[in-house]
Image (cartoon, helix red, strand yellow):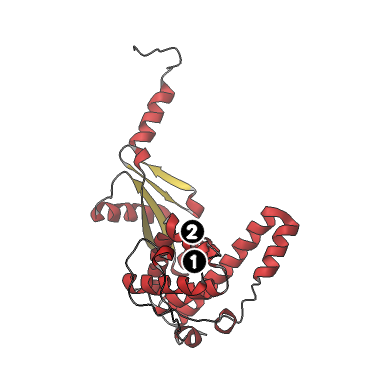
Amino acid sequence: MASALQNATASLQSKTPPSARLPTNFTSPKPLNLSFSATFPSLNLSTTATTTNRRRGGSALGTKMSATAAGSYASALADVAISNNTLDATASDIDKIERLFSNPAANDFFTNPTIDLEKKRQVVDEFAKSSALQPLTANFINILIDSKRVDLVKDIVVEFEKVYNKLTDTQLAVVSSVVALESQHLAQIAKQVQKLTGAKNVRIKTVIDPSLVAGFTVRYGSSGSKMIDMSVKKQLEEITAQLDLSDIELAA
């Protein structure tokens, strides 16, 4: 399976016209033409069946099936990464892919069914070059494009993180702050989270959140169920809660 994924051949004859490109400079295209069934034969995920079931069972069933499909894709990617001894490198690639798809223009480009698949493969190839993605990860994204399941990328990122964290006994901590924190501060936060959870490893993900005013928050635990709140916003909310301001009128 790993061999099939890594040895996938490339074929593309035309370049992406400027109107179909993302707002980034790209070089010569070498898109990948992959077969999902040949690479991951153990996964029998039918787009048509999923669409039909969504119509019959409503949005709740559709959401559940999408989560199941995303979990299957994530597990398959992790299996191949383990067999290649590239699990950590693949996790790093997944972070890069998450950042790409968090860009609304990029997400709209890849999920737009009217844009030719070859054009999407070209963008993947150029992104892989500029971001130093492994061939394994770039091929995986092209598989999703060929299978018309690229809309699952965000869910696959979440599911892959769960698989990776379980395999490596890693606790994910999401640190939100108004400005980027220094590396030594993030290291201190990681040590504290490790002490609280007993995890072997702690993986920090940073988020910029201007609404915090100042300070930072740390979410960890199952699905971010626990939080350390050291933000000024939290302090202001506590002060406001302690004061009865309902009858106070501010001077004009």
Give x and y (percent) for residue 239: 38, 26
Q: Residue at x 43, y 25 (%)?
A: 241
Query: What residue is rendered at 52% in x and 62% in y?
Result: 111
Q: Is residue 241 above or below residue 150?
A: above
Tell me the CA gap for discs 2 and 1.
Answer: 22 Å
- Which label sits on residue 160? 1
Residue 99 or residue 186, whichever sits in front: 99
For residue 36, which quarter of the picture? Answer: bottom right
Give the residue at x 70% y 59%. 54
User: Which is in the foreground here, disc 2 or disc 1?
Assistant: 2
Measured as percent of width and height from the top left, residue 56 is found at 75, 58
Q: Amino acid at mark 1?
A: Phe
Residue 203 drawn above or below residue 145? above
In the displayed orientation, state which residue is furthest to the right: 56
Q: What kind of element bears circle 1?
A: helix
Out of 116 and 170, give the one closest to the viewer: 116
Q: In the rendering, which numbered label is found on residue 108?
A: 2
- Residue at left 55%, top 81%? 35
Residue 141 visible in the shown view: yes
- Dividing the picture into quarters, in which one does residue 231 lie? top left
In-image side of 1 versus 194 (left or right): right
Name the residue type under label 2.
Asp
Question: Which quadrant does the C terminus fall into?
Answer: top left
Mark 1 Cα shell of 10 Å, populated few (<14), some (14-19), many (≥20): many
Q: In the rendering, at what x and y percent does residue 93 appear? A: 39, 69
Q: Closer to the camera, 52 or 182?
A: 52
Question: Is residue 246 positioned above or below 136 on the image?
Answer: above
Front in this rendered view, residue 63 or 198 = 63
User: Label 2 crowding class (10 Å Cα cut-off): few <14, some 14-19, many 20+?
Assistant: few
